[in-house]
Image: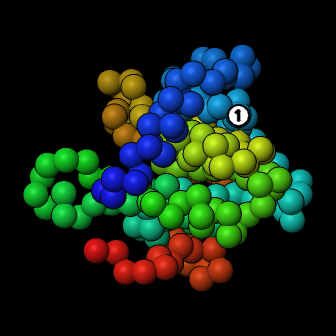
């Protein structure tokens, strides 16, 4: 990871800890809280989008692999907040995910800072971190979809879905999703990944 990214990461982490959180959702785990304090469930996000499809934007910040192979909301733009680190995965050491160094730049190319953006990831953690990074860059109306696309893990040991992401989330709420790709919405890296 380039050294020039360290200060940005430090600032984002400090903001996540020190800035106030909306009292409306303080029951969320800390990793799902954002500096903007704007949250929606998957169902609420879909209802917002249905009410004003031209104004409400949905941003999927999962990796391209997740977007393609797990599926995605059909109207969601994909700009990954983090990228899968294949080299570290093969070596089996270090983080498997690394920050997308162009995330804010790419979000800025696709959206205005005044747009209403609903941010989704797998389970609500990356979307919160992405919202915090976007807020630092001047985005003012970015909601985190707290359940994400796949939802939370089932905690009932008696369930056949125990430990799996089958509780809530976009995919488990009966909302429309697809694995079909729309070139206008999908992320295409500006340069080949090394």
Quadrant of the frame with the C terminus: bottom left
| Mark 1 secondary-structure assignment | loop
Residue 119 position within the rendered picture, expressed as x and y whole percent measured from the top left: 64, 50
Indicate the colouring scheme.
Answer: rainbow
Left or right side of 69 for 73: right
Quadrant of the frame with the N terminus: bottom left
Q: Nearer the viewer, residue 127 or 180?
A: 127
Residue 49 position within the rendered picture, expressed as x and y whole percent measured from the top left: 80, 55
Residue 74 can be seen in this image: no
Quarter of the image holding residue 142? top right
Residue 93 position within the rendered picture, expressed as x and y whole percent measured from the top left: 14, 49
Left or right side of 170 for 43: right
In this rendering, the answer to whether 129 lies above or below 72 is above
Residue at left offset 86%, top offset 60%: 55
Residue at left offset 52%, top offset 38%: 12
Give the number of callouts: 1
Instruction: Identify residue for label 1.
Output: 36
Residue 128 position within the rendered picture, expressed as x and y whole percent measured from the top left: 57, 39
């Amino acid at each position: 990871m380039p050294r020039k990214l360290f200060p940005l990461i430090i600032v984002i982490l400090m903001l996540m800890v020190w800035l106030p959180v909306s009292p409306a959702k303080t029951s969320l785990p800390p990793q799902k809280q954002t500096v903007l304090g704007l949250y929606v469930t998957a169902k609420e996000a879909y209802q917002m989008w249905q009410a004003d499809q031209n104004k409400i934007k949905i941003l999927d910040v999962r990796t391209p692999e997740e977007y393609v192979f797990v599926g995605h909301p059909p109207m969601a733009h994909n700009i990954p907040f983090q990228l899968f680190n294949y080299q570290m995965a093969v070596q089996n050491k270090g983080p498997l995910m690394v920050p997308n160094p162009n995330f804010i730049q790419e979000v800025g190319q696709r959206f205005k800072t005044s747009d209403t953006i609903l941010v989704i990831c797998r389970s609500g953690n990356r979307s919160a971190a992405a919202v915090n990074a976007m807020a630092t860059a001047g985005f003012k109306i970015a909601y985190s979809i707290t359940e994400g696309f796949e939802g939370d893990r089932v905690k009932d040991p008696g369930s056949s879905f125990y430990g799996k992401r089958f509780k809530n989330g976009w995919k488990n709420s009966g909302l429309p999703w697809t694995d079909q790709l729309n070139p206008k919405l999908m992320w295409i890296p500006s340069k080949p990944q090394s």
